[in-house]
Image (cartoon, rainbow, N blue to C red):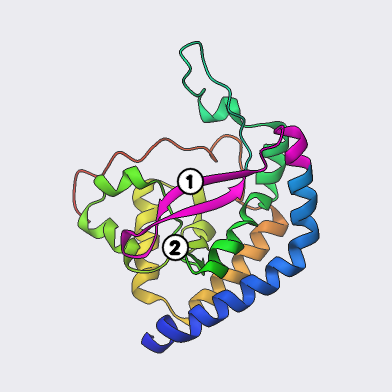
Amino acid sequence: MKLYKTLIKPFFDRLLATIGFIILFPIFIVVWSILMVSNRGSAFFYQQRPGKNERIFKIIKFKTMNDKTDSNGELLPAQQRLTKTGIFIRKHSLDEIPQLLNVIKGDMSLIGPRPLLTKYLEVYNDFQKQRHLIKPGITGWAQVNGRNAISWEQKFEYDVYYVKHMNFLLDLKILVLTVYKVFKKDGIYNADNDIVPDFTGTKTEN
């Protein structure tokens, strides 16, 4: 497992991410062009996220929400800012394509726990913090086992399971299931559960 984790997996991450980005580049340009028009010049969404060992990096995704605010200048709830174009892009998981650049750069892996908001670092318990022992991924064990349809606690259990059992066969299984779910649109996007409440912590240790 150590050889796979430290040498083989990082090599294939960059190799497959590079090949994938080249193959998807025409789609990348089309989506970028559409968002440049619909978002009035803002096609990408950047945000700081914690990576391996809680090191902060900047994630890049296609922007699927507008920046509309209320009368006090505060951003409207996420569900109200999600655009029609954004719904289509999320439904087909096209918003994830730019993250291949994060993988090529070395901030992320193709497969691993999803990188969440930095503010959650303050409320993780010791069990949940284990998700940061490895690089975060574009897809992961939690994503192919329910994504946002499961509770935060279940997600973290899947994440930590992956950290402790990471191997080539498990990665291959996750990759195949991800491709299957994207093409079948099975559990990838649901307007009712894709935007979930913030994680505020778990009272008891796992």
Furthest-front residue in this view:
41
**Furthest-bottom residue in this view:** 3
Magenta stretch holds residue 147: no
Q: Residue type at mark 2: give it.
A: Pro
Reading the image, the residue beneath label 2 is: 136
Residue 157, placed above or below residue 36: below
Q: Which stretch appears magenta?
A: 34-62
In depth, the one of 131 and 205 nearer the eye is 131
Looking at the figure, which quarter contains the C terminus?
bottom left
Q: Please tell me which residue is depicted at 59% across the width and 28% down the height of the picture.
A: 81
> Dot 1: what SS?
strand
Residue drawn 81% across the image and 59% down it = 26
- As for residue 35 lying within the magenta part, the answer is yes
Q: Which mark is residue 47?
A: 1
Say which of 176 and 93 sits in front.
Answer: 93
> Which percent across, then down, holds residue 152?
37, 47
Residue 186: x and y in percent read: 64, 53
Q: Marks 2 and 1: which is nearer the front?
A: 1
Marks 2 & 1, CB-CB < 8 Å contact: no
